[in-house]
Amino acid sequence: MDTKPAVETFNLTRLYGEMVALNNLSLVVNKGDLFGFIGSNGAGKTTTLRILATFLAPSGGRAEILGHDVVKDADAVRHIIGYMPDFFGVYKDMEVTEYLDFFGACYKIPSTQREKVVNDVLELVGLTEKKGALIGALSRGMQQRLGLARVLIHDPQVLLLDEPASGLDPRARIEVMAILQELQRLGKTIIISSHILSELETLCNRVAIIEKGRLIYTGPVQGVRDQMASGRVVWVRVSSDPEQAMQLLRARPEVTEVLPADGRLKVTLASHDTDHSLVAEVLVKGGARLTELREDELGLEEVFLRVTKGETQ
Ligand SMILES: Nc1ncnc2c1ncn2[C@@H]1O[C@H](COP(=O)(O)OP(=O)(O)OP(=O)(O)O)[C@@H](O)[C@H]1O
Ligand SMILES: [Mg+2]
């Protein structure tokens, strides 16, 4: 059991009627990860998190939290996760401590211990001074931190947080991020969803990018950056001597690499600003016979832009 990842999904699929909201999603989140789950609106983030939190049944595939199946072993899963939904009801007329005490009771924490637990989580999220305040009188950022305190009350090992920083001003957002870093330091595994890659870039060690329910990238954050920093890739095919074509291209400073691949040449340009017509020009002027030229379709740069398009944050 110890070697199990914190979260693992196996071809997880979810339909709403005919609509495929999640499509064969296979993911691994390791223990101790602060894992960014990124996708544009409607990508399937909430659907995935709700399945992991045992609130929604998958249509296909399965998922495990610390080796427990989220369907067959739902009770065990509920004890080891803390799920913060994207929208949660606020009990405006309740006091902060009452609210947390209530959830502590739901998790059957004995009343003798509850006061200490409530104080500890309030301390962790920086709300100690607001103990006696009515929830309705808290700012949005404070309410969000209270939401975090609530999911921590039963000391879960895995946190599933659905856009915990949405709607917060930059300062409140930084405060939430700092709390998450502290929780990671305390050994928690955290999945945090967002539609803004740049927001999670410095926070998370690993990310997954999904779109229309499909996984596009998963791995270290650095991997996304490396991919984005590398130049654009153009695929060409020539009916003349490929060696000669390679020499022509390699002689150009705008070209960083030319590799033969699958009957074609994979040409990497140093900069995204270089137009791919340069490749055609170099080849044709050099006397090569160009029969095909195609730009790489799914570079992560494109993925990044698509995932984050329209975002100003
Ligand atoms: N209860 C539902 N009934 C029908 N379709 C649904 C339901 N919930 C979600 N969907 C659809 O499933 C897809 C994925 O939705 P989901 O809420 O998981 O996306 P998301 O990545 O969380 O998006 P957002 O960034 O807007 O929160 C969307 O096309 C959505 O319209
Ligand atoms: Mg959502």
Image (spheres, helix red, strand yellow):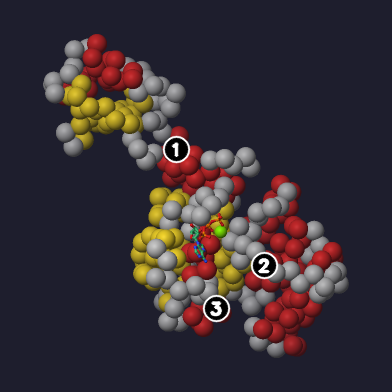
Of the two numbered discs 3 and 2 in the rendering, the one whose residue sits closer to the viewer: 2
Task: State whether label 2 is within 8 Å of ligand 2.
Answer: no
Which quadrant would residue 311 be assigned to in this image?
Answer: top right
Q: Earlier in the sequence, mark 3 or mark 1?
A: 3
Q: Determine the residue positioned at 57% across, 53% down.
A: 194
Q: Residues within 10 Å of mark 1 (few under 14, many from 20)?
A: some
| In the foreground, 294 or 183 | 294
The part of the image, by quadrant, that contains residue 268 is top left
Q: Where does residue 67 sit, x and y in percent of width and height?
A: 42, 75
Q: Residue 97 location, x and y as percent? A: 80, 75
**N-terminal of the two: label 3 or label 2?**
3
Quarter that holds the C terminus: top right
Kind of element beneath mark 3: helix
Residue 78 image label: 3
The disc labelled 1 sits on which kind of residue?
Answer: Glu
| CA distance separating discs 3 and 2 | 17 Å
Of the residues shown, which amino acid type is indicated by label 3? Arg
Give the amino acid type for the residue marked by disc 2 in the picture: Phe
Sequence-wise first label, 1 or 2: 2
Circle nearer the viewer, 1 or 2: 2
Q: Residue furthest front?
A: 17
Disc 3 crowd, CA 10 A, few/some/many (<14, 14-19, 20+):
some
Give the residue pinned by disc 2. Answer: 88
Q: Which residue is mark 1?
A: 301
